[in-house]
Image (spheres, helix red, strand yellow):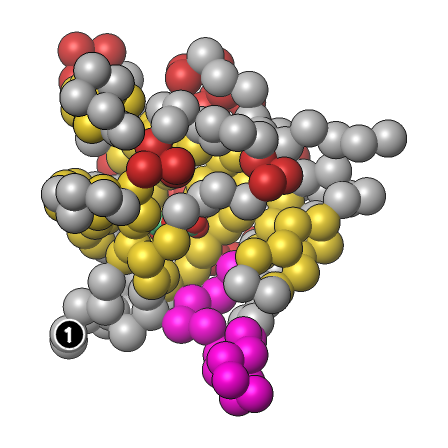
Amino acid sequence: MDLFDQQVIPVSLGSEEASGEIIFWPNWLSGPEADQLLQIAIDRTPWRHDSIKIVGKTIPIPRLQNWFGDPETSYTYSGIRLQAIAFPDWMDNLRASVEQHTNQPFNRALVNYYRHGKDSVDWHADDEVELGPAPVIASLSLGVERVFQLRHNQTKERLSIPLPHGSLLLMGPGIQAYWQHRLAKVADLQEPRVNFTFRYMETER
Ligand SMILES: O=C(O)CCC(=O)C(=O)O
Ligand SMILES: [Mn+2]
């Protein structure tokens, strides 16, 4: 890993003075490391295909997913309750490397499998109360490059960051409160992509 490859992208928050930060490592993993991890992730993750209810209709979400962390806990978003699965060793090693590299604690991961260009995630923020007042999110991308889009809630300013195979992106504190993000559908794209978002949640006992 070449540390000089780090990119810092300042992002505006709630006032002119306040600013947040996205830190991006486009080549965090080497090509062969990323290839191997993509295959392991596709083969070994127990993928779920969840549905959400919108005005009484049950609609399958356009991606596969699962949620990892302390198995006595769960995570709920858009009405989907995900009971956490304990990190398998291969994913825990990855979690620990991300923690070490970013110098941030992570004890949960939402893993998404975009099977092709018709899979996507719509505008949202990772701002569930369980994630605390200023979540820090680390996002690892594997597979075909897709564009991560961000949109400021008030100013509607937009940012687009293409996420290559093996890249790591860190959204710093404040971003979830002022911005939403999405991964739009792409026409005629057959190649898969897997994304890990590592998060931190206090565990109540
Ligand atoms: O796949 C991505 O890059 C984004 C995923 C995401 O926003 C999420 O899981 O909350
Ligand atoms: Mn998100």
Q: Is residue 103 left or right of residue 144?
A: right
Q: Is residue 39 visible?
A: no
| Along the line of sight, the residue nearer the viewer: 170 or 35 | 170
159 or 85, nearer to the observer: 159
Q: Say which quadrant the N terminus sits in.
A: top left
Q: How many marks?
A: 1
Residue 135 shows up from this direction: yes
**Which x, y percent locates residue 168?**
32, 31
Vertical arrangement, residue 175 with respect to residue 81, above or below = above
Asked whether mark 1 lies closer than 8 Å to ligand 1, one says: no
Task: Pick whichever, 70 or 175, lies toward us.
Answer: 175
Q: Which residues are magenta?
A: 51-65
Quadrant for the C terminus, please.
Answer: top right
> In the figure, 174 relative to 180: above or below?
above
The verdict on residue 29 being magenta is: no
- Above or below residue 1? Residue 47 is below
Q: Is residue 30 left or right of residue 174?
A: left
Dot 1 corresponds to which residue?
187
Q: Is residue 54 magenta?
A: yes
Query: Main SS type for the magenta part?
Result: strand
Q: Residue at x 48, y 42 (%)?
A: 127
Q: Residue at x 23, y 24 (%)?
A: 15
Give the class, few, some or many, for how many residues have Cα within 10 Å of label 1's Cα (few <14, many ≥20): few
